[in-house]
Amino acid sequence: MIGWQDLQRSVAFRRQQWRRWRLSRQPFAEMDAAIQSAFSSTELSVSEKLEQLVEYFWTAHRHYRHPLTTRVYYPGLGSIYGPDNDGFEGMSRLLPLWAAYICSPHAKESLSAEMTDYMLKVLRTGTDKTSDCYWGDIGHKSTLICEAADIALGLWLGREKLWPALTEKEKHNVLQWLKQVSGKQTADNNWHLFVVLTEKVIEALEPGYKGNVADRYNRIKSFYLGQGCFKDGENGHVDLYNPWCFHYILYWLDRIDPGFDPDFIKQAICDYSRWFRYLFTSEGCPLFGRSLCYRMAMPTPVLAAHHYAPDEFSAGECLNIFYSCWAFFVANGALKLGKPTQGVFADDERWLDPYSGPASSFWATRSLVLYLHLADEVPWSTTALQALPAEREEVELDIPEAGIKIETRPKQQLSRVIFTHHHGQFDAGRLACPSLKDKIRQCLLGGVQRPANNLLKQEVRVFDSRLEYYRRKRVMGSIY
């Protein structure tokens, strides 16, 4: 049944789709073959390959952006939040990457200057209420709360180059826009961290400001189970939001405010990494939970653990975990048209959550952001890769706090995660695809009608690095 609210939303989405069509560029495939070739090369060093990866993303971003908007419209399947939100993610989710690069000791001067000018333009126009490019006001449970955290982090990472270049009025506009997250209602899960991070950045940039984060941060800590594991909300799972959201943001909170909660953050990240590092093999790593298109962000906590305990988590081991994850997925279709694909391997709507749009998967670059940031203190370019833990040790580890067990089989280059309280087996027949009703509603109303497939919710018991569940091929459609 189609109601009045459906019709109102349909009108709004149709307008957004028209705007997207008017401001979009043609798909950019010119560098896809080159980045594939770079990662398969035996002549390029790891650092050279990762430099090319940043250039790959930047060149495509430069192609897709439009002078009449700060939104960046990448091609692909849209999200339930509409084209405007999808375009916003195309800008916001990459700001930390550009900021980390311009502050990297190995950044190319010309590239760094381009990125800096671009970020300044985005910050100036996006937070100016008189501008046609104004990002809009932030309301309760708005997706802008999520994106504000990336904008705040990008600003903090690049603060030495960005903040002095803004006028006092521009600084005021930026801070006032970010301050809108204060007191806003959010989902009762990892979203609390978006507000805490944003508030901490404001504190760092505005002397005398004190954000109200205690209740939110205590709520996050109430989700802590031990061994570095957080459940994602009161009834949430211990899934891969741990590495690419919980530990990622906790690490930045510690860097932004070293006195915030250093002992807990360091212990959580290191405890998690002690068992989590055994998941990575040169032939893949187990994926479980939601938002699997962020898969290349999995190594994030291990890189952070090297910062905290370099003797235990060696640079060579952590670099290999990070690089092997990227290399495996790049070799298996993870990059296309200048962005991470919307699936586990190539684009595949079965593994794309309804809330994910064309640029959502840029959260995969969170591990790359950390790698670039740590380049100030870690000589990555001269670090030799060391053997992956899963390929040198046969282990069986129990993580009772999370209800999981880890196993490795070095001879098979295999790692396995067993959810001890689950009893289900993977069944391809249970995977949901858009129904005829979904397709009709999508056609009539313009909004996305896409079901989610979360195998943890189906209580699948075993996930391993062969990733067989996700290998069945399917061609992705498009609503645009």
Image: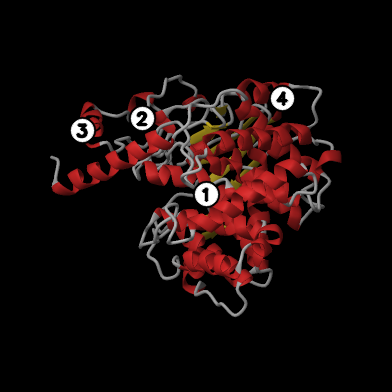
Q: Residue 333 at x, y = what percent? A: 56, 24
Counting other residues with Cα less than 10 Å from the Cα at mark 4, is it few (<14), some (14-19), or many (20 or more)? some
Query: Residue at horizontal 43%, vertical 32%?
Result: 351
Mark with earlier residue (3, 1):
1
- For residue 378, the mark is none
SS under mark 4: helix
SS under mark 3: helix
Marks 4 and 3 sit apart, C-alpha to C-alpha, by: 44 Å
Look at mark 3 in the image and give the residue it sits on: 444
Q: Is residue 60 visible?
A: yes
Look at mark 2 in the image and give the residue it sits on: 480
Which amino acid, by three-letter code, is at mark 4?
Ala
Marks 2 and 3 sit apart, C-alpha to C-alpha, by: 13 Å
Look at mark 4 in the image and give the residue it sits on: 38
**Is 304 located above or below residue 324 in the figure?**
below
Which amino acid, by three-letter code, is at mark 1?
Ser
**Is 170 located above or below residue 247 in the figure?**
below
Which amino acid, by three-letter code, is at mark 2?
Tyr
Is residue 402 left or right of 189 when viewed as pictured? right
Which amino acid, by three-letter code, is at mark 3?
Leu
Q: Residue 460 at x, y = what percent? A: 43, 36
Look at mark 1 in the image and give the residue it sits on: 92
Query: Residue at horizontal 49%, vertical 38%?
Result: 292
